[in-house]
């Protein structure tokens, strides 16, 4: 067992003077330990190339850096020449050819010509080129800028888009077990920003890991030694978890291949082994390793609209709960429902305890990023449970805080300047509200919801769409009168 050490001293990236990447240390070490193809995704100037070059230098590996947007296939393999009297080819190559490389890095892979991208496929996936094994090659890493959307001109932040960066062929993306969004400047903490700007933040003379005693190759070996034991200890449970993850991803419109399911399972094991090495065995939990594997292992990270980390974390936690509660018939039925609101209905029908219901309620509120939808859901839940359930304060507090926009009687005035977006919205709301007020019951509650959200909620959300969601939520939870 590894003695507990200061995790600040065991940061691979920081020891290589790449700052703000500490949260990726275990993922990087795992990728190195299982020699998995790895794709880095980030904006320009975020140290993607710098990290890879310093990793290869720290391991003293023969390194090749190719700009995939510029190279030709001959630059990789050389010019083939038939051998006289032999049924084989030899190649006239340059020092930059791939044959003797141990670590190759394909930069700008999203700008690579489609025909060349297809030729990179067997190198990345099989360590083969024109049917020949690359016997020395161990690591195949690549980097890209985020691909541009179909219509960037429709977005005010179009300057952030890379118009030459195209989505990879899905089959190629699916050959990268690790697909890692890297931090930009806005993601760095202040201390990391200061380190980036420090005049002393340069590479050490020999390029080795310098912040702690054990060299990078030693860390890789220690991680590899743990893989078999971790698989024996947790493999069966991970199978149940991964089956659930794949089902939930599919329902979330993030379908995966069977290959990806196997990759993710191996990634969980490798990341857990890496975390044990870096953080100490007693300090790490498998649930957190699985979360990292999912965050940095879905191929949709390489698309123009990647899934949000919050969505992946919520999906992971639900899958983990289902997998750990498979022996409980009631919870298996509850957690099998993927919709967070319908899950509450199922749980209420099964009469689960108030404390457990409170947890489902807070999870449902956290599921929706829109404040307008949170208010809608909270109002419906508050009215359903206000006299039926004794939820915990952790659930009642956000419910009451959000629902008071709709339910608390009050007088309010708002000055609206003419010919502004707010005035346009109000001109549409006013006659609608007057008409709805003529009907008692729920229509008045819906009006309160719309008026309570004006103007701030309707600056980011379409109020008419929000009304439809609100009516749906009220009906779902059986709210029949105001």
Image (spheres, rainbow, N blue to C red):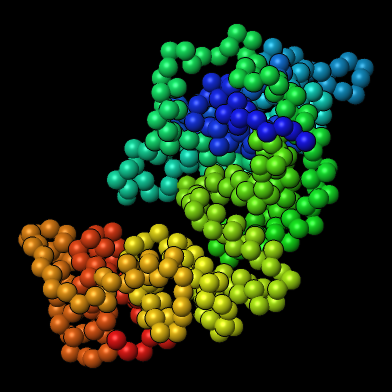
Residue 152 or residue 364, whichever sits in front: 364
Say which quarter of the image contains residue 179.
top right
What is the x, y in percent for residue 418? Answer: 7, 61
Residue name at image x 27 percent, y 81 percent = 445
Residue at 71 percent of width and 69 percent of height: 326
Among all residues in the image, which is located at the extreme right? Answer: 85
Front residue (pair 353, 304): 353
Coordinates of residue 410 in the picture (x, y in percent): 17, 74
Instruction: Where is residue 85? Give x, y as percent.
Output: 92, 17
Tally of marks: 0
Please indicate whether residue 60 sits to the left or right of residue 301 in the image.
Answer: right
- Quarter residue 203 falls in: top right
Please indicate, yes or no, whether residue 38 appears anywhere in the rendered image: no
In this rendering, position of residue 204 left or right of residue 1: left
The quarter of the image holding the N terminus is: top right
Q: Residue at coordinates 56% horizontally, 77% vertically from top-left?
A: 353
List x then y, in percent, for residue 4: 68, 33
**Residue 22 in view here:** yes
Please state, as top left, top right, bottom left or bottom right, where the C terminus lies in the image. Answer: bottom left
Q: Residue at x 79, y 40 (%)?
A: 227
- Asked which quadrant contains residue 61, the reply is top right
Relative placement, left or right, of 126 versus 297 is: right
Q: Residue furthest top?
A: 205
The image shows residue 115, relative to residue 297, as above or below, that is above
């Amino acid at each position: 067992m590894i003695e507990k050490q200061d995790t600040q001293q065991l940061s691979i990236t920081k020891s290589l003077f790449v700052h703000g990447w500490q949260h990726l240390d275990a993922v990087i070490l795992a990728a190195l330990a299982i020699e998995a193809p790895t794709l880095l995704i980030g904006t320009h100037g975020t140290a993607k190339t710098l990290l890879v070059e310093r990793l290869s230098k720290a391991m003293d590996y023969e390194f090749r850096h190719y700009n995939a947007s510029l190279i030709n296939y001959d630059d990789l393999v050389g010019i083939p020449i038939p051998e006289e009297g032999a049924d084989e080819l030899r190649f006239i190559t340059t020092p930059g050819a791939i044959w003797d490389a141990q670590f190759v890095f394909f930069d700008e892979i999203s700008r690579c010509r489609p025909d060349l991208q297809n030729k990179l496929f067997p190198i990345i996936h099989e360590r083969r080129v024109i049917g020949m094994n690359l016997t020395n090659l161990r690591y195949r890493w690549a980097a890209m800028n985020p691909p541009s959307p179909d219509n960037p001109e429709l977005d005010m932040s179009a300057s952030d888009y890379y118009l030459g960066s195209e989505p990879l062929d899905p089959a190629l993306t699916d050959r990268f077990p690790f697909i890692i969004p890297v931090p930009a400047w806005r993601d760095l903490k202040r201390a990391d920003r200061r380190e980036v700007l420090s005049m002393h933040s340069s590479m050490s003379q020999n390029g080795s890991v310098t912040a702690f005693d054990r060299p990078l190759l030693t860390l890789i070996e220690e991680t590899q030694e743990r893989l078999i034991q971790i698989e024996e200890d947790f493999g069966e449970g991970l199978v149940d978890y991964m089956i659930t993850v794949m089902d939930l991803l599919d329902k979330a419109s993030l379908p995966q291949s069977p290959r990806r399911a196997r990759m993710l399972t191996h990634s969980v094991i490798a990341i857990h082994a890496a975390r044990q090495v870096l953080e100490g065995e007693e300090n790490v939990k498998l649930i957190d390793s699985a979360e990292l594997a999912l965050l940095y292992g879905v191929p949709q990270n390489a698309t123009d609209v990647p899934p949000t980390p919050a969505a992946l974390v919520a999906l992971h936690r639900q899958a983990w709960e289902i997998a750990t509660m498979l022996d409980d018939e009631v919870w298996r039925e509850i957690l099998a429902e993927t919709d967070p609101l319908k899950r509450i209905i199922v749980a209420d029908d099964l009469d689960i305890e108030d404390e457990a219901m409170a947890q489902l309620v807070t999870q449902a509120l956290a599921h929706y990023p829109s404040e307008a939808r949170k208010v809608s859901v909270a109002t419906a839940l508050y009215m359903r449970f206000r006299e039926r359930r004794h939820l915990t304060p952790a659930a009642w507090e956000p419910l009451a805080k959000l629902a008071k926009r709709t339910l608390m009687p009050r007088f309010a005035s708002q000055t609206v300047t003419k010919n502004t977006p707010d005035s346009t919205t109000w001109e549409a709301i006013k006659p609608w509200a007057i008409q709805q007020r003529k009907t008692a019951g729920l229509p008045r509650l819906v009006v309160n919801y719309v008026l309570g959200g004006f103007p701030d909620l309707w600056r980011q959300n379409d109020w008419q769409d929000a009304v439809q969601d609100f009516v749906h939520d009220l009906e779902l939870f059986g709210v029949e009168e105001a």
